Image (cartoon, helix red, strand yellow):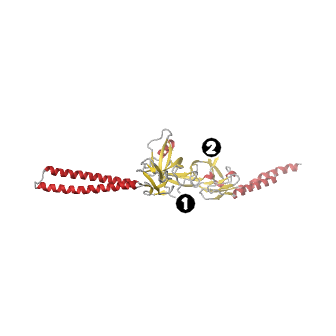
Amino acid sequence: MLLLVLLTPGCDLAKREAPEEKKGDEAVPAHVVETISRNVVEYAELTGRAAPVESVEIRAQVSGYLESINFKPGSFVHKGDVLFQLDPRVYQAVLDQRKSDVAAKEAELKQLDSDLARQHTLDERQATSKQQVEQAQTNYDTCLAQLEAARANLERAQIDLDYATIRSPIDGEVSREQITVGNLVSTGTTLLTNVVAVDPIHVFFDVDERTLLRFREETRELSSDAPLRVKFAIGDGAFDHEAVVDFSEPRLNETTGTLEFRAVADNKPNENGRRDLLPGLRLRALFPTTPEYEAILVPEEAIVTDQNVKRVYVLGDNNVAEFTPVELGPLQDDNMRVVKSGLKLGDKVIVDNLLRIRPDTIIEPIPAPSQSTTRIVREDGTIINQDGTVEYDDLYEWSLQRDKEENAESNDET
């Protein structure tokens, strides 16, 4: 009995010391990246809309029966392209008559000019009266004025004839025809179609008062002539479009408490011949609230939410994980997160296998690129890549398998 009592504590001590002997085997493998530094700009996400730079309602400036339609609905037309043709015969007849009137007045004026010259010659010889000279001058001046009126009528007749051919006043896409051939078109009242300019295109968005005040405070030292660029996205897409602000309203909307901005964006057709932006399309705009500044960035997947505090695991001395609180800035397009405080350039941050890591955990670091992989690691180790493909984290699976084996060994020893 005494021998059993003496041997039992020794067995317990051996069991307690066994984990200490394999402590070095308990290191958790994880990818580690170094923080990077680059210039960034902070943005506020706003709702915007696309609007045409120019939009024209096509109406006739003279009356007449519609003779032909010379465009395909929805096609792109250039300034000066013929869209509609009215019956020109009446206007051609009026033009011919006006030309005859001008020719008659020119002949009459030529005759009166000769009479006036003759009267001046006779007056020099004192062979005519002053009254006859004055009458000749009056007749000449009257005919000259009538000739000018006839020429004005001729010009008006030419304009009316030109208006019978209805052309596009701008470059843009033309809508469908609102009237068919053979119908009577009334001056200024009959809507024929619409032409909408599509390149470039306007982007309108409203900036709330709080965002506007922050923007004015952050950029008060910048020149007002510096171009203000905004990014925008179509639907749920990426913010891969850019526009330059060219106008803002001089006062806030008192009802909404916002200020309207207008930007200009290119809208050239893509390789399929289609344009990304349609007038009236709803957009998401990124309005810059700060000038460009240098910032520390880490991959978004390294961020851990600890209740209301954001933290990251930093690789400390002896490869020990340190749970460090951080103040975060905006998320960048490449899934990198700005860190305003808590980290410095060159700090080594753990980006995966975070479910198995606790403060003071020994890490087996695996170097990885500093840029974010823009992936989502679920608790079961499933990875969703940026392109939507799904794969399995081999490192995570291996670590889980090793945990199972260690737990099994521990149970066997027990």
Q: Seen in the image, is 122 located left or right of residue 233?
A: left
Numbered mark located on residue 308 in the image: 2
Mark sitting earlier along the chain (1/2): 1
Whether residue 39 can be seen here: no
Q: Seen in the image, is 261 located left or right of residue 34?
A: left
Asked which secondary structure carries label 2, the reply is loop
* Residue 270 image offset from top left, x and y in percent: 53, 59
Residue placed at 15% from the left, 51% from the top?
132
> Can you tell which quarter of the image residue 352 is in?
bottom right
Q: Nearer the viewer, residue 9 or 308?
A: 308
> Can you tell which quarter of the image residue 347 is in?
bottom right
* Residue 72 image offset from top left, x and y in percent: 50, 57
Mark 1 or 2, which is nearer the eye? 1
Look at label 1 and name its amino acid: Asn
Whether residue 26 can be seen here: yes
Residue placed at 24% from the left, 52% from the top?
143
Numbered mark located on residue 198 in the image: none
* Residue 249 image offset from top left, x and y in percent: 45, 44
Q: For label 2, count other residues whose C-alpha is less than 10 Å away and answer few (under 14), some (14-19) or many (20+).
A: few
Look at label 2 and name its amino acid: Asn
Instruction: Look at mark 1 in the image and give the residue it sits on.
Output: 272
Looking at the image, the residue that sits furthest to the bottom is 271
The mark tally for this picture is 2
Q: Nearer the viewer, residue 373 or 406?
A: 373
Q: For label 1, count other residues whose C-alpha is less than 10 Å away and answer few (under 14), some (14-19) or many (20+).
A: few
Q: Nearer the viewer, residue 109 or 379?
A: 109
Q: Are marks 1 and 2 in contact (CB under 8 Å)?
A: no
Q: Nearer the viewer, residue 176 or 252?
A: 176
Q: Seen in the image, is 38 located left or right of residue 11?
A: left
Residue placed at 28% from the left, 52% from the top?
148
